[in-house]
């Protein structure tokens, strides 16, 4: 049975709404952004929104098709990046162990009788960097042929922890969604709260995010790899917070030291996507360093730190064919910022 969407509102927040400005106020070429908008109309029929924030302010906001400002977008695998942020917050607060902790020290009660003898070697850091060595299959465009079997199981944690481990693959990157869900479970076992409730208090409320949804697993844990739904503006708030080293509206929301690791390459990834940090892709695009929360269909929070820019894309999430928005960034948005 498909779990129902859970809607929660954060407590009343005095955080101001996202600051706004004109592109030219931040040294950004509005003409090139308009060209990006026209390219979306011509070439991206499944796009729902394109938002651009720069130097602390939202400077561009366009919606397409079924997209609108109040829409809760299905982030798909961009959820993974938010799960990492929550782990960083919980670690800083002393509520969750450091990345070097063996996974079975926290999730021992979920380990099935039949499991790999290498399981005690796997740490939270392996999960954060997707280097756990659990046997998995990853196809083109990050497709995962085994993910449906994982989703159909009643006990996701036992399924993941019972996967065979390939010893020579421990420490080598492979895109693997169960790793991300186990991070969510470690958060819950450590704090006594599911990831959604924890996010509402410690991440969403400080950012003024008051409307969100996060699907639960069959065991009622927040899915760590997919399932988060946010508005496009709230995705942009997260981007602005990350650009400021975890600060938002004068408050340190996410530990800067965690972001130094999460947004930097921790392991070689895939050439088509970049290297991998703590549940973030990272690399270089048009000679600009980037960090990226990426989900199927083109759900993205893209950071361009040297340009002080954050870009949000949302699109149809339940599709097998979609066009990557990278061309928009390289051909129009980066030049618009570089000209400033």
Image (cartoon, rainbow, N blue to C red):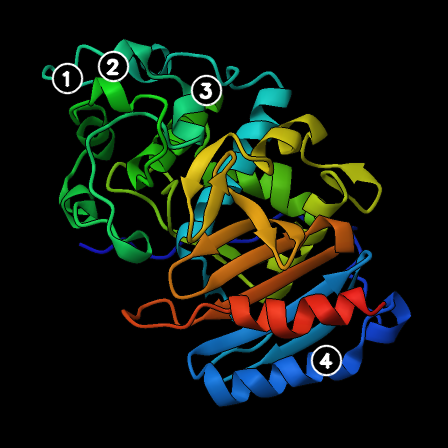
**Residue at position x 47%, y 13% from top?**
100
Q: CA distance from mark 1 to mark 2?
A: 7 Å
Q: Earlier in the sequence, mark 1 or mark 4?
A: 4
The image quarter containing residue 187 is top left
**Residue 209 seen in this snapshot:** no
Q: Is residue 211 above or below residue 119?
A: below
**Residue at position x 82%, y 73% from top?**
23
**Residue on which the image places disc 2:** 119
Front one among 7 and 338:
338
Quadrant of the snapshot with the C terminus:
bottom right
Q: Nearer the viewer, mark 2 or mark 4?
A: 4
**Residue at position x 24%, y 28% from top?**
134
State if disc 4 and disc 1 touch (CB < 8 Å): no
The image quarter containing residue 123 is top left
Q: Earlier in the sequence, mark 2 or mark 4?
A: 4
Residue 255 in percent (x, y) is at 68, 29
**Residue on which the image places disc 4:** 32
Front one among 110 and 12:
110
State if disc 2 and disc 1 touch (CB < 8 Å): yes
**Residue at position x 77%, y 56% from top?**
307
State if disc 3 and disc 1 touch (CB < 8 Å): no
Residue 197 in percent (x, y) is at 50, 39
Residue 115, numbered circle: 1
**Residue on which the image places disc 3:** 190
User: Could you say whether the residue bearing mark 1 is in a helix, strand or loop?
Assistant: loop
State if disc 2 and disc 3 touch (CB < 8 Å): no
Q: CA distance from mark 1 to mark 4?
A: 55 Å
User: Could you say whether the residue bearing mark 2 is in a helix, strand or loop?
Assistant: helix
User: Could you say whether the residue bearing mark 4 is in a helix, strand or loop?
Assistant: helix
């Amino acid at each position: 049975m498909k779990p129902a969407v859970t809607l929660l509102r954060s407590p009343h927040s005095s955080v101001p709404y996202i600051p706004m400005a004109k592109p030219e106020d931040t040294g950004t070429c509005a003409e090139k952004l308009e060209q990006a908008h026209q390219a979306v109309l011509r070439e991206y029929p499944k796009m729902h929104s394109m938002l651009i924030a720069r130097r602390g302010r939202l400077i561009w906001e366009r919606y397409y098709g079924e997209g609108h400002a109040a829409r809760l977008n299905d982030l798909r695998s961009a959820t993974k990046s938010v799960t990492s942020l929550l782990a960083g917050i919980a670690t800083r607060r002393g509520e969750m162990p450091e990345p070097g902790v063996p996974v079975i020290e926290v999730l021992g009660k979920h380990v099935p009788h039949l499991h790999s003898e290498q399981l005690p070697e796997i740490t939270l850091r392996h999960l954060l960097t997707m280097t756990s060595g659990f046997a998995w299959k990853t196809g083109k465009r990050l497709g995962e042929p085994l993910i449906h079997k994982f989703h159909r199981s009643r006990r996701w944690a036992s399924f993941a922890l019972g996967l065979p481990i390939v010893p020579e693959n421990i420490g080598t990157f492979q895109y693997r969604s169960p790793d991300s869900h186990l991070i969510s479970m470690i958060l819950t076992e450590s704090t006594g709260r599911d990831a959604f409730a924890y996010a509402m208090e410690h991440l969403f409320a400080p950012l003024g995010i008051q409307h969100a949804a996060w699907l639960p697993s069959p065991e009622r844990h927040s899915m760590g790899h997919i399932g988060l739904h946010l508005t496009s503006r709230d995705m942009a708030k997260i981007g602005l917070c990350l650009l400021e080293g975890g600060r938002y509206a004068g408050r340190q929301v996410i530990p800067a030291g965690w972001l130094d690791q999460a947004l930097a390459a921790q392991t070689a990834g895939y050439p088509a996507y970049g290297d991998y940090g703590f549940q973030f892709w990272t690399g270089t695009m048009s000679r600009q360093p980037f960090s990226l929360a990426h989900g199927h269909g083109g759900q993205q929070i893209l950071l361009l730190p040297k340009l002080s820019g954050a870009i949000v894309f949302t699109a149809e999430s339940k599709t097998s064919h979609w066009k990557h928005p990278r061309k928009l960034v390289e051909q129009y948005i980066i030049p618009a910022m570089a000209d400033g």
